Image: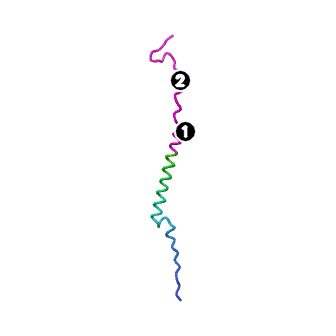
Amino acid sequence: MEKEKEFIDNSHKDLAHNWVSTSRFIWLCQIFLFLALVLGGCYNLYTHRYKGHPKVEVPDNTLYNPKYK
């Protein structure tokens, strides 16, 4: 009686054995992370943007041409 060995090929499902799908997956992860960092940086710059000149009271004796009492 001859026994046949059943061989199940799972190499196409593993990332370590399929370099094409592995490189595609890594490339897509890099693109996603890059876009997330860029959008996060833009949002951070938008929330901490310069709001304009504040109204500051300057004493008269500290001006370029000081005015004394």
The reply to whether discs 2 and 1 touch (Cβ–Cβ < 8 Å) is no
The CA span between labels 2 and 1 is 23 Å
Instruction: Tell me if mark 1 has few (under 14), some (14-19) or many (20+) residues whose alpha carbon lies within 10 angstroms of its own.
Output: few
- On the image, the x and y values in percent for residue 9 come to 51, 73
**Depth check, front residue: 26 or 1:** 26
Which residue is rendered at x = 52% and y = 30% of the image?
52
The magenta stretch is: 40-69
Instruction: Tell me if mark 2 has few (under 14), some (14-19) or many (20+) residues whose alpha carbon lies within 10 angstroms of its own.
Output: few
Secondary element type, mark 1: helix
User: Which secondary structure type mostly characterizes the magenta part of the structure?
Assistant: loop
Which residue is rendered at x = 51% and y = 71% of the image?
10
Which residue is rendered at x = 49% and y = 46% of the image?
38
User: What's the colour scheme?
Assistant: rainbow
Q: Amino acid at mark 2?
A: Val
Residue identified by numbered label 1: 47
Residue identified by numbered label 2: 56
Mark closer to the chain start, 2 or 1: 1
| Total numbered labels | 2
Q: Judge whether residue 49 is colored magenta.
A: yes
- On the image, the x and y values in percent for residue 42 come to 51, 42
- On the image, the x and y values in percent for residue 34 come to 48, 50
Image vertical order of residue 4 relative to residue 45, above or below = below
